[in-house]
Amino acid sequence: MILAIDQGTTGSTCVVVDADGDPVGRGYREFAQHFPHPGWVEHDAAEIWSVTRAVALEACDDGGIDPSDLVAVGITNQRETVCVWDPATGEPLHRAIVWQDRRTAGMCDRLRDAGHEPLIRERTGLVLDPYFSGTKIAWLLEQDPGLRDRAERGTAVFGTIDSWLLFKLTGEHVTDPSNASRTMLFGLDRGDWDPELCDLLGVPVRALPEVRPTIGGFGRIRPDALGGATCPVGGVAGDQQAALYGQACLDPGEGKNTYGTGSFVLLNTGMERVGGAAGPEGLLSTVAWRIGDRTVFALEAAVFATGAAVQWLRDGLGIIDSAAETEPLAESLTSNDGVYLVPAFAGLGSPHWDPYARGTIVGLTRGSTRAHLARATLEAIAFQVVDAIRAMEAAGAAPLRVLKADGGATANRWLMRFQADLLGVPVVVPAIHETTALGAAFLGGVGVGAWNQRDVTRTWREAARFEPTMSRDRAGSLHAEWTRAVERSRGWAVRD
């Protein structure tokens, strides 16, 4: 039995997985969100630990096993969120600053104005944005001179959520490259903390965790930490990378999309960075995982509004009562009749990155109905995924061979068929929907030798496969019209 810890933004999920990769026990619990100022988002790190520990024990109880019978633990986590704690006492020294937090926007602007963005982009594969961890750490150090002194002396340490959980479980201050690569302090080519970037942001390297391979040794669980469990933590990865692994996208050209409120598209690009030293515009280069000295990279695209667009139909317009209604509405039409919705409610994400874009509906006629809006919304979800994947391929990634899909929207069979038609490759939905937790379990199991990578591929099972049937000319024509609609949405908001 392997315990997967999936520590998310609003709650912690733990799943016990058996030797066949099947979930046999589960627990879930939410924790508090703190918003001390507009644009600030914080978590109580101590609460995250207590909730995660309780949920892990609940999952073991639900599976009818004693924690001492676990052979491994795998961890996946919300990325970019920063914790700081005293390594002697294990007590947090500040609330965790969450990935959604925007308090360092001004710091990012100053770094950009000073000409540092190209260096950051080249070294890290990331854009200069408050989303990432580095400026959060810099902000904490700027706000508390005493904290800087402690960090330099080694009596205060920083880490992302994986590091915090690992410290509480094993007493070791460690992380993995998939999480480290989201900090804006990690050199992708160097494979470790970049001294120049750390110096630029004023972050003492000694206060950062040791970077170990994603699969391997992260220490053994202390007997008092998790109900008597003493097994190793065999694998750790950020949530999107864990989902990529959980979908068994282990070879270049294999990609996954998580259809949630927004969407995260990741494409395995193999052992070389794609898109040149500066990285492909509109996309993020990131570490997928490291096994031994072998690092696998991925391209990542963030789409801001996918499921959120369907929620808008329900809550904003009131034209549907549930998301499930969109499927028969879309099927009731033989075509979109030229109606396109661009759901740029908070701007456009990858590959456009236009914060001034706004939601747009084009092509309406007197004959347009709610069915047209429902279909246009589903089509927009698929079009945005196509834009992200085509940008990846244009940057030099191997052509997509199959898209593995997870998330709530995979229940919409019309959307999955349309996605396959636009991409021209199969779209596959897995039998086990909790792919992030399953990825953590796979990582943990491979890390202790309970499985190997062939077992991951063998254990992964599909529930549904959607083959493309639309002609390439027809798909290209629809996408061209979508592109026209996107252009009309861009730059709409007035710049400050």
Image (spheres, rainbow, N blue to C red):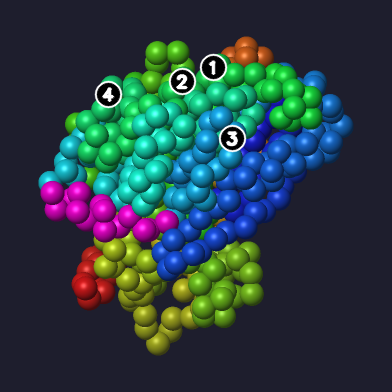
Which numbered circle lies on residue 212?
Answer: 2
Q: Is residue 24 left or right of residue 207?
A: right
Q: CA distance from mark 1 to mark 2?
A: 8 Å
Marks counted in the figure total 4
Which is more toward the observer, 197 or 117? 197
Q: Which residue is mark 4?
A: 189
**Rendered residue at 53%/31% (across/down):** 87
How many C-alpha atoms fall within 10 Å of the one at disc 2: few (<14), some, or many (≥20)? many
Tell which tag, 4 or 3, sits nearer the viewer. Answer: 3
**Magenta region, residue range:** 101-114
In the image, farthest residue toward the right: 64
Label 1 close to label 2 by CB (< 8 Å): yes
Q: CA distance from mark 4 to mark 3?
A: 32 Å
Secondary structure at numbered mark 1: loop
Give x and y (percent) for residue 460: 62, 29
Q: Quadrant of the C terminus?
A: bottom left
**Rendered residue at 55%/24% (across/down):** 172
Q: Is residue 62 left or right of residue 339?
A: right
Give the amino acid at mark 4: Asp
Q: Which residue is mark 3?
A: 90
Give the main secondary structure of the magenta stretch: helix
Give x and y (percent) for residue 418: 47, 53
Q: CA distance from mark 4 to mark 2?
A: 15 Å
Mark found first going from the N terminus, 4 or 2: 4
Label 4 close to label 2 by CB (< 8 Å): no
Q: Is residue 112 a member of the stretch shown in magenta? A: yes
Secondary structure at numbered mark 2: loop
Q: CA distance from mark 1 to mark 3?
A: 24 Å
